[in-house]
Amino acid sequence: MKRSELVVVANRLPVDHVGEGDGPDAWRRSPGGLVTALEQVMAGRDAAWVGWPGKADLMMEPFEFDGNTLVPVRLSSDNLEQYYEGFSNGTIWPLYHDVIAAPIYRRSWWDAYVRVNRRFAETAATVAAEGAFVWVQDYQLQLVPKMLRELRPDLTIGYFHHIPFPAYGLFAQLPWRSEVIEGLLGADVLGFQRPADAGNFQRSVRRLFKYPTKANRIDVPDGEGGTRRVLAAPFPISIDAEAFVELAERPDIIARAAEIREQLGNPRKILLGVDRLDYTKGIRHRLKAFGEMLVDGTAEVGDVTLVQIASPSRPGVEAYQDLRDEIELTVGRINGDYDTMHHTAIRYLHQGFPRDEMVALYLAADVMLITALRDGMNLVAKEYVAVRTDQRGVLVLSEFAGAADELGSALLINPHDIGGMKAAIKKAIDMTPAEQGRRMRSMRRKVLHNDVERWGQGFMAAVDEIRAAKGAN
Ligand code: GDG
């Protein structure tokens, strides 16, 4: 097999199967943020991407796509149920998001997680060239760094954690906590979203292993009497801000934004929520606040409309099925009580949309509601800010989303405080254009400057530094 200097390992390949057969023509680049983020790092390099192709039991040879080698990892439907829906999304996801839903600890899921992580590590080991850099992505693959180091000590290994890393008091619940920390410590550079996440990880390392940590550096025993230095630091992820600005300036998208307002019956203010349908996003809390505003008259149907896009997510996980039922019941009740023949209180769409339409929605929205109970970063917040080249619009942003670290000029809220959230939404609805402009300008400076290219460069600079230090030893 052809071997590459840079290998990305992620749960999913960056493509979706759209055509007939399994040839390269049948694939299209997936729209996700991770793909865009890494595209820039991979461009112009001899790079490979190891991941699951998105269909159970699909056995495929590596293939070339857009100048990179894609290396499919086969997963059976049993693997998907136990490793992906089970351990990744039924255990780790709720545990790492502060136990908003109850994590399920099941030994058979853990066993499957170990097996599948090993398969990813073995595949990456066959693809990486001598001394290559391998960049592992996210919580589904926390054991890969250690497994890969054992197979290929010549490699430099990075890992980026897209979701929060919890406080030790919660993390300690995990029956396999030591194995997970050991797995991650196989990397040379560990990236987290917020300083708090990197701090939580370091505390877990100290509590469980007593390894010394100082200024984001951890000295891990190398098994030969010496130590190996691991960097565990924040690298807040971002968006391709320029690409969003270009979309926001396209006349057809601007016209579409006006059309959306028209189609909603020309309300004075449009509020918008865009989330994967996930219990971490605080959609229920948002609906509660908005519903109460209709009851107490701080918002009126026709004057204000809430558009809620909830893109379908993880339909195989029970907690997501329950959440969907609950949200749809609430939306139905509110609309039943308040809709008129001309206007709706909440326009709810359980659908995914093309990016153009998303940008038109952002442009149409006077107020963007991000009420996550816990969120690694939240790229929607950054996208909304990037497209507002008119310096208008108000971002209501949960302090529990990583984006709050950079976007302090948003109206920051605690989504558990329904009264506080209602007051912030009211303030957003009433905000003067001058104040909107002042806040938006300050946030846009941050997002345009700290874009995804900078994120990639920052991480790679840390990797280069570690590599240079290794070379010097
Ligand atoms: C995880 C972490 C972290 C959503 N619906 C549609 C659509 N989207 C796009 C958004 C945005 C992305 O998906 C969602 O990213 P978020 O960051 O908001 O949230 P997660 O999916 O939970 O992502 C998160 C992220 O990883 C990156 O590290 O920020 O904290 O949980 O780009 O625009 N895009 C299109 N149609 C949709 O219907 N085209």
Image: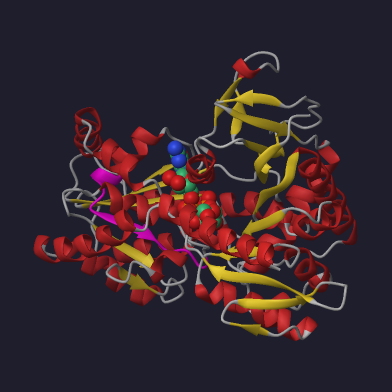
Q: Could you tell me residue 95's position as x and y percent?
A: 68, 68
- The residue stretch that appears in magenta: 362-374
Q: Is residue 390 visible?
A: yes
Residue 305 located left or right of residue 234: left
Q: Quarter of the image for the C terminus: give it.
A: bottom right
Say which quadrant the N terminus sits in. Answer: top right
Q: Nearer the viewer, residue 256 or 6?
A: 6
Residue at 18% across, 41% down: 266
Up-down: is 298 above or below 345? below
Q: Residue at x 72, y 33 (%)?
A: 71
> What is the quadrant of residue 18 in the picture?
top right
User: Within the image, what quadrant is residue 54 found in?
Assistant: top right
User: Residue placed farthest to the top in the image?
Assistant: 20
Q: How is the image coloured?
A: secondary structure
Residue 159 position by quadrant: bottom right
Q: Residue furthest front?
A: 472
Task: Provide residue 398's location: percent of width, then percent of height.
Answer: 41, 68
Membership of 366 in magenta stretch: yes
Left or right of 2: which side holds 394?
Answer: left
Identify which residue, 301 or 383, lies in the foreground: 383
Q: Is residue 99 visible?
A: no
Task: Locate residue 109, reporting x and y percent.
Answer: 84, 55
Q: Is residue 242 magenta?
A: no
86 in relation to 75, above or below: below
**Front one among 356 and 423:** 356
